[in-house]
Image (cartoon, rainbow, N blue to C red):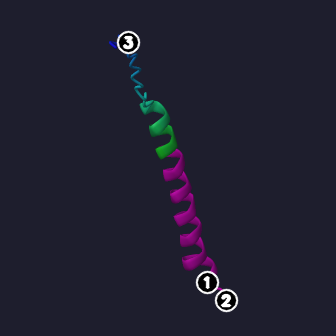
Amino acid sequence: MDKNVDIERHEVHEKSDSSMVWSTFIKYAAYLVIFFGVLYLIIYYLLPLV
């Protein structure tokens, strides 16, 4: 009993959008800069007033 079976192969390639990666990196870097800026403001300007 010979069976002639055709096997169909599908290859999936993930596309990485480098502009999306960079924009996300810049967004979170800006969040960090703002966070550390507020932290600096609290430590050096508001804390000595207390």
Labels 3, 2: front one: 3
> What range is drawn magenta here?
26-50
* Label 1 environment density (alpha carbons within 10 Å; few <14, some 14–19, many ≥20): few
Membership of 19 in magenta stretch: no
Residue farthest toward the right in the current orientation of the protein = 50
- Three-letter amino acid code of the residue under disc 1: Leu
Whichever of labels 1 and 3 marks the residue nearer the N terminus, that label is: 3
Give the answer, above or below, for where 22 lies relative to 35: above
Q: Which of 17 and 8 is in front in this view?
A: 8
- Rendering coords of residue 47 (x, y %): 61, 83
Is label 2 in contact with label 1 (beta carbons under 8 Å)? yes
* Disc 3: which residue: 6
* Disc 1: which residue: 47
Residue depicted at x 56% and y 63%: 35
Measure the alpha-carbon separation of dots 3 and 2: 79 Å
* Label 3 environment density (alpha carbons within 10 Å; few <14, some 14–19, many ≥20): few
